[in-house]
Structure formats: structure tokens, C-alpha cells
Amino acid sequence: MQNKRRLSQENSFSMNISIATVFPGLYREFLQTSLIKRSQEKGIVSFDVVSFASFCHPKERLDGPTVGHGSGMAIRPEVIERMVNGQEEKHGFAYKIFLTPQGRKLDQKLAVELSSLFLKNSHIMLVAGRYEGCDDRAQSEYADLEVSIGDYVLMGGDLPAMVLLETVMRHIPGVVAKEDSIEQDSFMGPFLDFPTYTVPPREWKGRQVPEVLLSGNHAAMNAFRKEKAVLRSVKEHFGWVRARCIKKDDKKLAYASMPAHYVVLMHDHVLVQDGVVGTSSVTSLDIHDIARSCSTYGIKGYALVTPLIDQRKIVETILDFWHGAGIQYNNNRAEAVELVSLEESLEKVIAAIESKEGKKPLLVATSAKVQEGVRSITYYDQSIVWKEDRPVLFIFGTAKGLSSELIKSCDYLLLPVGGFTEFKHLSVRSAVAVVLDRWMGINLSRVD
Ligand code: SAH
């Protein structure tokens, strides 16, 4: 009832959408189909599709050659000016959106923002470019917003205009019947939608509808759907999850869907000089600094590997401090140091993880250089590693880095981190922090 009242109030609000295009015919079917058609019948919105050509004087062209070398045509500024003035005379002042590959990328968040903008402005204008686009002066003069639908170039802005309408209109009250279905849509929050099935058939090509969805137990169904939604979002769309995960509970859910990660710092099988493989000394700072990075990013264990007895004694002494007096001295550091273990070889670290997790870890080497003979992965490749459903062990080197034999024995090599300079000498402590952040850190895309 409340919903109905709200809808009827909003329906009395009339929204005009002008669309300026070279090819108005493209919109005929689109505007006469399904929910877009119904939203006009319901009086929520009306469309006015206009051709740039109708704003040209007799014999005048709507496009003109672009200046500079590289041939091409663009829509002329005077034609855009006449179109804007003509449409504003007809429907009042417009909020103007130019579709261009260089604009703000359309995503669910922008779609929601635009839906409230559509509701606040009685006239919205979508300007679809074509050829090389619109003259830049006219675009800069008139565009309140430039929108791109993705990092690729289309022949014209008409499909982008339709894509924008298909997504924004879903959020205008009354357009999509069941409003709550929108709330569960993919990309509304940090997670994507759960998988859907139709019944009948309960079984199709040997694939069953999950039993729990047929159980009638709503709590169990919701829990199952949430779990599936989080799992597939984390595994397949981690970039989105990390960009949108703000709430503590959501972070917890996402973390629980990631495989267990471990870190090892090698003081053996490292390059002590170019071409010479050997052992290195332990640095006390590496113990608690790296432990703190590991705690921050949810690493399950951090092992230091050194086969040297005197070096092991040093580490044991430091660890004893953090397990005793260090607790009083700095409790946070002491807590982080709980993750630290000392091993004499990488094999022992791997065996310890296997006995704890029940599966051998995938070995991910890190290096300041790329190397042949091992599969390189980037910081966008979580889905490749995580779909193997095994624990992950990041291997960091000391001295001049891991030996190439060790790197070649790993499953993957993570590309080096770095900036736009040629200097590539991060301390291993800094490298661990940067790598962990790039691999599994929160990375919000925009502040709400
Ligand atoms: N030379 C331009 C592309 C022009 S494509 C460039 O490289 O940036 C012609 C028109 O198609 C554009 O003016 C725009 O309206 C539309 N268009 C092409 N790709 C688009 C995209 N990804 N998003 C939105 N509009 C796009």
C-alpha cells in the first residue's frame, strides 16, 4: 500500500528524455518494447528522439571534417547548439549527458545516481555522437556529464544511450514491478546476485536444482543464496568486491570465501651475489614488520626459513621477547608476531601448511624481475589462483632475491611491483606490504 502511494506520487512527475542522434530509426523498436514501452504508457517518462539533421539548414551538413592530420568527421558545434536550444525551448532546461568513450564509466553506482538525477530533472538530454564524435568545444560547453559504457570504441553513442536507459530506468520507481528484486541485483552491494533456476525442470542434462532451494526453508535458502553469491563474487569478481566492501560483516563474509594465504620469507636459496646462490642473515625488523602486514591482510601464517643454527637462535630470542615482555611493550605487535614460525626449509613450511589445510599450497614466487619458465600472473589474476581451491603460499626472498631454480619450481610468479621509474629496490618489508595490498586489500573505488 505504501509502495503504491509512493508510486502514484512519483508517476505524476513527468520526465522528458530527449535523445539526439544521427540515426533516430535505431530507437523505434527499442522504445516500443517491454518495460521501456510500459513506462511511457504508465506516464512515468516520455521520449523525444531527434535527428541532428533536423537542426541543419537546407544543404548544410551535420558533420564536418576534423582538423589536423588523420581523416575523420565529427558532429559540428553549431548543429549541437541548435539542437540543445531547440530541445530546451520545447521541454525546458535539460541535464545533458554526452555518450563518449572518454566519459565516466557506467556502473551500477552511477546508474543509481543517475536515476535520482532523472527524478529531479524534468528534462534529460542524451547526446549520441557518431563518426569521430562531437566537436569538443560543443561537448565542453554543454555536457553536464560524459558517460562511457566501457573501455572500447563503438561506431556511435546510440547503443550506449540505450544501455544507459536500460540500467537507469530499472531504478525509477514503477518501471520494474517488484522493487525488491532490484535490491538483490548484482552490483547493488559488494556482491553479485545468486544463481537462479527455474522449476520445472528439477533436473536438466543431469544438473539438479540445489535441494535446499526446494526445501521451503526460507532461512536455509537465504543462507545458501548468500553463501553462493559471496563465493562467486570473491572468486570471479574480486575487483568489484574489494572496490565496494565497506561494512564489517561484508568484509568478514568475503574473507571467509578466500582460500587461506601464507607467507614465507626465505633466507636460503637466495642470490647473495649475481649468479651465486646461498643463505642470508635474518633482519630483526622483518620479523615484526612483516608479521604486522600479514595480520592486516589476513595471512594465516608467516614463516621465516633459515637453515643456519646461529641465525635460528637470533630469531628464537626475538620471538621469545614478543611472546613474553613484548606483550607489555607493544601488544599489537606481539599479537601479530603470533603468526610467525621458524623453519629450516621451504619443504617444511609446505608440509606444515598441507597438514593444517589438508591440501598442498600453491606456490607463488615474487621477484623484482620477470622470469622465463614459470607462469607469470598479475594483480588481477586472483580468479586464476583461487579457482584451484588450494591454500596459497607467497614466497619472498631476502638478499638479492629468490634463486631462479626456486622460482621455476613454483606454480606462479607474481609480476614485480613498482612505479613509473626504473628504480626497483624495495625492502622486502615494503614489498610484502605492497604485494599483499594489491593481491587482497580493500581498494574502494569511490566514497559514497
Ligand atoms: N575517436 C573517438 C571515438 C569516436 S566513436 C575515440 O577514440 O575516443 C563515435 C561515437 O560513438 C562517440 O562520439 C560516442 O558517442 C560513441 N561511443 C563509442 N564508444 C563509446 C563508449 N564506449 N561509450 C559511450 N559512447 C561511445
Image (spheres, rainbow, N blue to C red):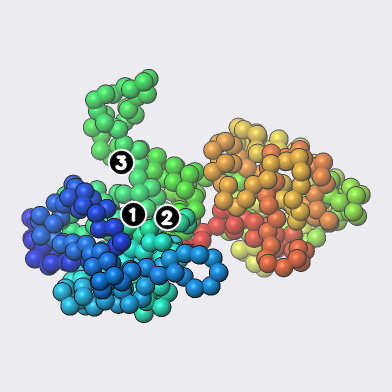
Task: Inspect the image, locate mark 3, and give the three-letter code of the amino acid beneath it.
Answer: Asn
Q: Mark 1 points at which residue?
A: 159
Q: Dividing the image into four equal quarters, which quarter contains ligand 1?
A: bottom left
Residue 435 occupies which quadrant of the picture? bottom right
Residue drawn at x 68%, y 59% is 417
Residue 328 visible? The answer is no
Circle nearer the viewer, 3 or 1? 1
**Looking at the image, residue 433 lies above or below residue 360:** below
**Looking at the image, residue 260 lies above or below residue 440:** above
Of pointers 2 and 1, the one earlier in the residue sequence: 2
Circle 2/circle 1 CB separation < 8 Å: yes
Residue 206 visible? The answer is yes
Label 1: how many Cα within 10 Å (few below 14, some 14–19, many 20+): some
Q: Mark 2 points at which residue?
A: 154
Label 3: how many Cα within 10 Å (few below 14, some 14–19, many 20+): some
Look at the numbered disc 2 and say if its residue's Cβ is closer than 8 Å to ligand 1: yes
